[in-house]
Image (spheres, rainbow, N blue to C red):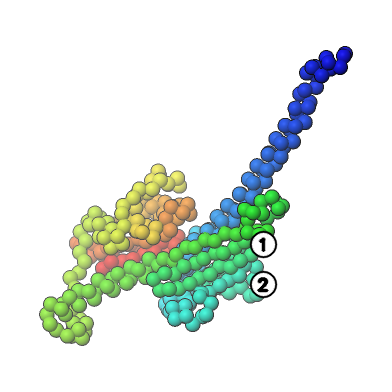
Amino acid sequence: MGKRKWIESEEGSLTIEASFVYPMILLATLSMIGFALFAYGKASLALTAETAAERTAYVWDNSRKDWETGASIPGEDDGLYWRTFGDSVTDLFGLTGSGGTEWSLGDSGETPTSGPAGKMAKAASIFPLEVTGELRFTNKWVERKVEARVKQPFHQGNLFQPFADGDHYSAEAASYVTDPVDFTRNVDLLAEYSGRLKQFFDSGRTAKDILLSGEEKPALVIRSEAEASQYIRRLVNGKSVVLETDTVGQSRKIDALDGDGIAHEAKYTVNEADARQQIQKDVELIRRGLIKGAVWHFFRHARKGTVALSPGLRQELERNGILVVIHN
């Protein structure tokens, strides 16, 4: 073959082209895999931090609650005055100096079992051992918040270091503590004394006379299931929703879902079999994160004068972490 024919020949061109293209394809593939691993690690850490903050805030009202399900054993709680002595009230006056109560991940000291630090320590178990950082709780009265600030080293080399914080991932998450029982109690207290204060302004009598008179406000009278549901929606400023379920039936109708994600159920009369199915549905919705908790409200029957809540049903509700409120 002459020199000219050798130059014009196309034999071996595929090998030459492949020697240029294949390294670029390999480099692009490895880069995509490395970026996917980097993104997965960062997203996984962020999800873990969010879960830790959200679940800790959800079970905040009782340090003996199960951290994952929110279930508690009746009679096991933090006492009547935990909001006064075990809720970092000193943060309101700036006495702690640190701006909150902290729990460091990987702390080798003795693990507390109660108080803000004990509640946050339960969340430490869901983080991998190499994760460092802290959980923090701050109490500003109207705003009680659990924050998670964590970081984890990554091992993808220097290629993705510009996308990270030095040589590690970092993630932050926060969740607000809600207290539906205390909220309902305060609403009832406000409703009780607002009527007496109105009497004071209308009658010209002194506040002391009104508050110590013992005059009763008109009793709440509910005559049907519909009235009970409507009253609860007004009380918690909620709305009726229907959520899909898988455990029992196809859906769960909630009488009132408030702005904090708490489901409120109004009961005037009770079918025990239906009620136990509804309990299972509420437990499923809590586990799936569709609601943050459940409160069942029972109303006294206008004609019978009784509340349709049996001891067995009440025990079942409390065993599954569902709060019970009785309206007389």
Q: Amino acid at mark 2?
A: Ser
Q: Secondary structure at mark 1?
A: loop
The answer to whether marks 1 and 2 mark residues whose Cβ atoms lie closer than 8 Å is: no
Quadrant where the C terminus lies?
A: bottom left
Task: Read off the residue under disc 2.
Answer: 108
Q: Which of 232/270 is in front?
A: 232
Residue 273 showing in the rendered view: no
Task: Read off the residue under disc 1.
Answer: 129
At 61% from the left edge and 73% from the top edge, which residue is drawn? 111
Badge 1 local density, few (<14 within 10 Å), some, or many (20+)?
Answer: few
At 39% from the left edge and 60% from the top edge, which residue is drawn? 260
Quadrant where the N terminus lies?
A: top right
Q: Which of 94/110 is in front?
A: 94
Residue 189 pos. (x, y %): 28, 74
Residue 135 pos. (x, y %): 55, 67
Q: Is residue 151 above or below residue 21?
A: below
At 43% from the left edge and 76% from the top edge, which residue is drawn? 83
Q: Which of 249/59 is in front?
A: 59
Of the image marks 1 and 2, the number of the one nearer the N terminus: 2
Quadrant assignment, res 118? bottom right
**How many marks do you count on the picture?**
2
